[in-house]
Image: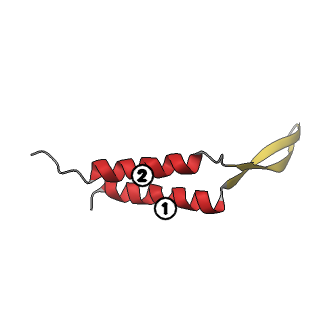
Amino acid sequence: MRSTVIGGIVLILIGVVLFVRGGTFTTQKDVIKVGDVKVTAPDDHTVPNWVAPVVVVAGIGLLAFGGMPRKA
């Protein structure tokens, strides 16, 4: 299998997981910074709903173009 086909399959799987379960990630936000002392707090973010279909379409595009025969 070519790497584009594998990449397309991986993108489709990631898009389906994002669609079914949603996506969140956490970053650290500086709350107070005084000299060498720093207090941080977790800041949760959600992945927008439009990301999942875009990732699936990109994966389908990679499958379509990756599966085409190469010109010699």
Position of residue 66 measured from the top left corner of the image (x, y, whole percent) = 28, 51
Residue 45 horizontal side relative to residue 40, left or right: left
Q: Where does residue 20 sit, x and y in percent of width and height?
A: 61, 62
| 3D distance between C-alphas at marks 2 and 1 | 9 Å
Rendered residue at 46%/57% (across/down): 12
Identify the residue shown where x is 71% and y is 50%: 46
- Asked whether disc 2 touches disc 1, contact meaning CB atoms under 8 Å apart, the reply is yes
Residue 21, image quadrant: bottom right
Residue behind mark 2:
59
The kind of residue tagged 2 is Gly
Q: Is residue 19 rendered to the left or right of residue 71? A: right
Percent from the top left, x then y, of residue 49?
64, 48
User: Residue 13, labelled with which disc?
Assistant: 1
Q: How is the image coloured?
A: secondary structure
Depth check: give the residue in front, 64 or 30.
64
Circle 1 sits in a helix, a strand or a loop, which is it?
helix
Where residue 53 sits: x, y (%)? 53, 49
Type of the residue with mark 1: Leu
